[in-house]
Image: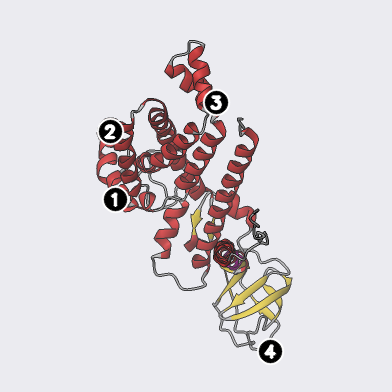
């Protein structure tokens, strides 16, 4: 007698647990996007406050006589800086617009921007309104907020010099470590070196900063002379930043090298290549996209490093190309002035956000470049 089989229900069963996990993953992604947008919003808002806030420059041109609240002509002394027509000036707390300018008199529109016309005694200085322009910000070579000079080039120059020195240390050293771990090291050696690299990556950066200041700098001064190497210098900071990012380069490069198929290595060995020739002429070129991404991520990490440069590189902007001199990087400057006695929403305070926005844009460009390089040179193996 034939046995009848019950029909199988092939309808899709609800999987509430997987749906919940999918919702949590989506929420995590949206949260990361919202955090990034919030950071960008605060940086842009602070930077706009920096570029739109007026700078009042003393013209050294005082009033030549007392001025009543109803007067629209200001008698001024001929000395001092020239005041052009259409300029915004300030006398005491009152803001005015210059309608016509002569050598000894200014015809003005009084009581601008909510200020009230008031009496002003003779001898009061006239202040001329100025603002930080994008051209001045990106091309100026002097960063002196107290004097109203905001040229970011000294900070950018020091940042790139420290990062370049760091890459000269980290890239060859990290790549050599990655080649050794992926091509030469036995499993036992690999199990010892990998934790050591992770420990090196976990050391607090403030410890690296004092290591640069108390060990690397004295070593450089002993080798090159105290007249050549300053106590605070970009070279020692760059060397230690390179040591800091070496584990990052080594780890990402090793992953890229291990992703190369074993068949390429065996084909090279079959043609008579040595292990070194195989590593340098077959494996490394095949992993170029991953290695380039690792290097660019390391550059971004070096540019964003803070405590090492704050402790070892210097505490004042200095437009110099000598790596053995003291100079302040963008991150070091942010740390120094943000910890000082700055009034909230002042132009000095808002300059922190302008510098931070430049750092963000540099990092964004590097990450975009990394993705394009990976997409352009990625090798796909069957």
Q: Secondary structure at mark 3?
A: helix
What is the quadrant of residue 322 in the picture? top left
Report whether 101 appears left or right of 267. Answer: right
Residue 285 is marked as 3
Point out the tag, 4 or 3, that comes first from the N-terminus: 4
Q: Nearer the viewer, residue 141 or 203?
A: 203
Tell me if I can see residue 227 in this picture: no
Mark 1–mark 4 distance (CA, rounded to whole Å): 65 Å
Quarter of the image for residue 170 reads top left
Residue 135: give its label: none
Q: Nearer the viewer, mark 2 or mark 4?
A: 2
Q: Are marks 1 and 2 in contact (CB under 8 Å)?
A: no
238 relative to 293 in the view: left or right:
left
Look at mark 4 in the image and give the residue it sits on. Answer: 70
- Name the image quarter holding residue 37: bottom right
298 or 6: nearer the eye? Answer: 6
Q: Which residues are magenta?
A: 44-49
Where is residue 171 drawn, in percent x and y?
44, 34
- Residue 103 x %, y %: 68, 68
Which residue position is annotated with label 2?
Answer: 225
The residue under label 1 is 207
Q: In the rendered image of this protein, does residue 30 appear above or below residue 275?
A: below
Q: Main secondary structure of the magenta part?
A: helix
At 51% from the left and 52% from the top, the residue drawn is 142
């Amino acid at each position: 007698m034939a046995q009848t089989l019950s029909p199988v229900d092939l309808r899709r069963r609800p999987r509430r647990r997987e749906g919940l996990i999918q919702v949590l993953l989506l929420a995590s992604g949206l949260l990361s996007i919202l955090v990034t947008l919030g950071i960008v919003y605060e940086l842009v808002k602070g930077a706009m406050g920096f570029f739109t806030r007026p700078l009042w420059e003393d013209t050294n041109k005082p009033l030549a006589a007392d001025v009543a609240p109803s007067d629209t002509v200001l008698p001024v002394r001929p000395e001092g800086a020239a005041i052009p027509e259409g300029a915004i000036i300030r006398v005491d707390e009152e803001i005015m617009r210059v309608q016509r300018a002569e050598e000894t008199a200014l015809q003005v529109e009084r009581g601008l921007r909510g200020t009230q016309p008031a009496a002003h005694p003779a001898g009061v200085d006239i202040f001329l309104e100025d603002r930080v322009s994008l051209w001045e910000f990106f091309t100026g070579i002097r960063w002196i907020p107290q004097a109203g000079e905001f040229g970011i080039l000294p900070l950018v120059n020091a940042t790139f010099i420290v990062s370049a020195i760091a890459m000269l240390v980290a890239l060859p050293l990290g790549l050599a470590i990655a080649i050794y771990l992926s091509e030469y090291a036995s499993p036992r050696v690999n199990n010892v070196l990998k934790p050591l690299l992770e420990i090196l990556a976990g050391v607090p950066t403030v410890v690296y900063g004092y290591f640069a200041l108390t060990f690397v700098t004295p070593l450089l001064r002993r080798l090159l002379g105290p007249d050549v190497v300053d106590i605070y210098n970009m070279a020692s900071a760059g060397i230690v930043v390179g040591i800091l990012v070496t584990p990052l380069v080594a780890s990402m490069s090793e992953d890229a090298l291990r992703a190369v198929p074993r068949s390429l290595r065996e084909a090279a060995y079959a043609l008579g290549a040595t292990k070194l020739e195989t590593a340098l002429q077959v494996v490394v070129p095949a992993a170029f996209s991953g290695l380039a991404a690792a290097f660019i991520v390391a550059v971004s990490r070096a540019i964003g490093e803070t405590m090492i440069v704050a402790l070892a590189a210097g505490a004042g902007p200095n437009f110099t190309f000598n790596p053995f001199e003291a100079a302040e990087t963008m991150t070091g400057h942010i740390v120094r002035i943000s910890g000082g006695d700055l009034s909230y929403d002042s132009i000095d305070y808002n300059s922190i956000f302008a510098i931070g926005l430049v750092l963000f844009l540099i990092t964004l460009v590097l990450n975009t470049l990394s993705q394009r390089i990976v997409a352009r040179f990625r090798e796909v193996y069957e």
